[in-house]
Amino acid sequence: MYKKITDERLKDKNLKNIRIIYVVQTIGIFLILLKDFIAGEDVFGTPLFFVFILSNGVVAPLLQMRISVEHEDGEKKKVFDSLGKVIGISVLIGASILLIYKVLTPDRSWLEASIAGTIVGVIYIVIGSYMVWLQKKSQEE
C-alpha cells in the first residue's frame, strides 16, 4: 500500500511536516479548551483535556528523553545513574509534595496529601527508571 521512503531529504521533510501538524493540533486543542474555560465549562473533566495532557505532558517528554539520552555526552554527569538514586530522589520529591500539599491546604486530610505525594513519587520513579534503562541500553550499544 505505502512505499517505504529511502531518501533522507524526504524523510526529513516528512518529519518536519509531522512536527508542524503536531504544533497545529496542539494549538487547536488548547484554543478549544481555552474557549470552554472562558465559557465557564468544566475543562478538566473533558476527554479533550486528557488527550492534551497525555500527548504534551507524557508522551512528548518521554520521546524527547529517548533522543536526549542517545545524544548525551559520555563525560557529562548523569543525575539518574543508578536505580537507588532514582528511588531516593523520588521519595524525597513525594515527601516534599506531601508536606507542601498539607501546608498549603491545611483543611484537607492527611490521606489526600499522602495520595498526592505517592502519585508524584511513583511518577518520578517510573520516569527515572526509564532514564536509567535508556542510559544502560545506550551504553551496551
Image (cartoon, rainbow, N blue to C red):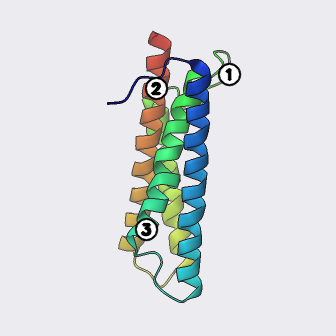
> Residue 112 shows which numbered tag?
none
Q: Amino acid at mark 2?
A: Leu
Most distant residue in the bottom direction: 40
Label 1 vs label 2, nearer the camera? 2
- 24, above or below 83, in the image: below
Res. 13 visible in picture:
yes
The residue that label 2 is drawn on is 134
- 93, above or below 138, in the image: below
Q: Earlier in the sequence, mark 1 or mark 2?
A: 1
What is the x, y in percent for residue 73? 66, 19
Q: Amino acid at mark 1?
A: Lys
Res. 103 visible in picture:
no
Alpha carbon separation for disc pair 3 and 1: 39 Å
Alpha carbon separation for disc pair 2 and 3: 31 Å
Most distant residue in the left direction: 1
What is the x, y in percent for residue 19? 59, 43
Most distant residue in the front direction: 1
Q: Residue at x 56, y 22 (%)?
A: 70
Alpha carbon separation for disc pair 1 and 2: 15 Å
Residues marked 3 and 1 touching at CB (< 8 Å): no
Q: Amino acid at mark 3?
A: Leu
> Residue 76 shows which numbered tag?
1
Q: Is 16 or 2 nearer to us in this picture? A: 2
Look at the image and tell me in which quarter the N terminus lies.
Answer: top left
Q: Is 127 or 27 nearer to us in this picture? A: 27
- Element on which disc 1 rests: loop
The residue that label 3 is drawn on is 48
- Element on which disc 2 rests: helix
Q: Residue at x 40, y 24 (%)?
A: 3
